[in-house]
């Protein structure tokens, strides 16, 4: 017999939910790299412990959804370029909603 409840199950964000994307958003959020404040790509790679190709692919998914933005400072060679990453306002709100949904789902366990 199924149990009926009067509350709605919180909805997880399918873009943020995969663990690598959640790690990226969590690191950016906790470091304050939001709303224009940025984190170096190399720092993000170190904090998330993700290989460069994996990090780049996951950032592309988040960027396509408008959750992060990347900017590049050009050095004298491509190897000396610096890439900066930030959670956008939309990304910050989506991350907060996702974390709140996770908290709500585990409440009372």
Image (cartoon, helix red, strand yellow):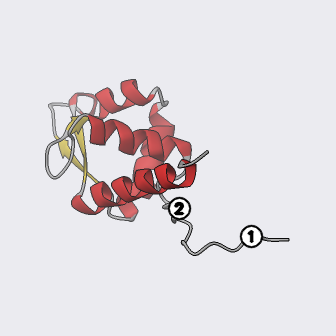
Q: Is residue 29 left or right of residue 20?
A: left
In terms of depth relative to the viewer, which is nearer, 34 or 44?
Answer: 34
Q: Residue at x 22, y 28 (%)?
A: 80
Q: In which quadrant is the C terminus drawn? A: top right
Q: Residues within 10 Å of mark 2 (few under 14, many from 20)?
A: few
Q: Is residue 99 left or right of residue 72?
A: right
Of callouts 2 and 1, which one flags the residue occurring earlier in the amino acid sequence? 1
From what the image shows, is residue 53 above or below residue 60? Answer: above
Q: Residue at x 43, y 30 (%)?
A: 48
Labels 2 and 1 touching (C-beta < 8 A): no
Q: In which quadrant is the N terminus drawn? A: bottom right
Question: Residue 99, how many percent across, how many down?
Answer: 42, 50
Q: Quadrant of residue 9?
A: bottom right
Residue beneath label 1, please? 3
Secondary element at tag 2: loop
Question: Residue 3, how many percent across, how many down?
Answer: 74, 70
In terms of depth relative to the viewer, which is nearer, 23 or 42?
Answer: 23
Disc ID at residue 29: none
Secondary element at tag 1: loop
Q: Residue at x 47, y 49 (%)?
A: 103
From what the image shows, is residue 7 above or below residue 104? Answer: below
From what the image shows, is residue 67 above or below residue 1? Answer: above
Q: Residue furthest right?
A: 1
Q: Is residue 70 left or right of residue 96?
A: left
Question: Residue 23, how many percent across, how many down?
Answer: 44, 39
Residue beneath label 2, please? 14
Question: Residue 106, how many percent across, how many down?
Answer: 56, 48
Q: Is residue 100 left or right of residue 108?
A: left
Give me the C-alpha separation between circle 2 and circle 1.
26 Å
Q: Residues within 10 Å of mark 1 (few under 14, many from 20)?
A: few
- Tell which tag, 2 or 1, sits nearer the viewer: 1
In terms of depth relative to the viewer, which is nearer, 47 or 99?
Answer: 99
């Amino acid at each position: 017999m199924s149990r009926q409840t009067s509350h709605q199950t919180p909805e997880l964000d399918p873009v943020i939910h995969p663990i690598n994307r959640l790690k990226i958003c969590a690191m950016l959020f906790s470091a304050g790299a939001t709303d224009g404040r940025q984190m170096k790509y190399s720092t993000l790679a170190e904090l998330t412990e993700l290989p460069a190709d994996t990090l780049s692919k996951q950032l592309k998914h988040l960027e396509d959804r408008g959750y992060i933005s990347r900017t590049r400072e050009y050095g004298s060679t491509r190897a000396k370029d610096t890439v900066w990453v930030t959670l956008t306002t939309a990304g910050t709100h989506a991350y907060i909603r996702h974390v709140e949904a996770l908290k709500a789902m585990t409440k009372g366990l």
